[in-house]
Amino acid sequence: MFLPTVYILASKPYGSLYIGVTSNVVERLYQHQVGIGSKHTAKYNIKTLVWMEHFETMADAIQREKSLKRWYRQWKTDLINEHNPNWYPMDAETGEFIIDDGRDPWDGSPLDNT
């Protein structure tokens, strides 16, 4: 499915970030997760989708990606926090947050529900 998308991956909450653009976010995320997406994401273990935005044209998506790459880091984290304040991993197909069994999605530790 062709859907121009800009996305942000993170190594952990507030960790290393990677901004990319693709026409197939599901396939591209898989590539990152198995280590063939980019040398940068493989080197710094940046594999978790935390933000994405869809566009009607690839030209618009590329323009947005280039713009985001020029942003200060704080602006990027603010953008993620605005849409995903807990930095939950996102499902690339649905855009929904992946929240499992009461365990932290980043390290597997039990969540404190107090």
Image (tube, rainbow, N blue to C red):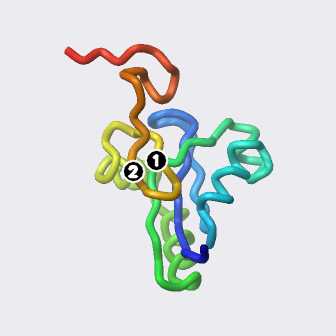
Where residue 84 appears, x then y in whole percent? Answer: 34, 46
Q: In the image shown, does 61 or 90 lie closer to the viewer?
A: 90
102 up-or-down from 86: above or below: above
Q: Earlier in the sequence, mark 2 or mark 1?
A: 1
Q: Amino acid at mark 1?
A: Met
Secondary structure beneath label 2: loop
- Crowd around label 2: few <14 · some 14–19 · many ≥20 (10 Å): few
Quadrant in the picture for residue 43: top right
| Residue under the point 42% across and 21% down | 103
Tell me the quarter of the image containing the C terminus.
top left
Q: Which mark is residue 33?
A: none
Where residue 66 appears, x then y in whole percent? Answer: 56, 71
Disc 2 to disc 1, how far (Cα)? 6 Å
Tell me the quarter of the image containing the N terminus.
bottom right
Secondary structure beneath label 1: loop
Residue 68 falls left or right of residue 42:
left
Residue 50 falls left or right of residue 9:
left
Q: Amino acid at mark 2?
A: Glu
| Residue under the point 33% across and 47% down | 81
Mark 2 in CB contact with mark 1 (< 8 angstroms): yes
Please name the residue that numbered disc 2 is placed on.
96
Quadrant in the picture for residue 23: bottom right
Where residue 29 appears, x then y in whole percent? Answer: 64, 53
Q: In the image shown, does 55 or 16 lie closer to the viewer?
A: 55
Q: Which mark is residue 90?
A: 1
51 up-or-down from 11: above or below: below
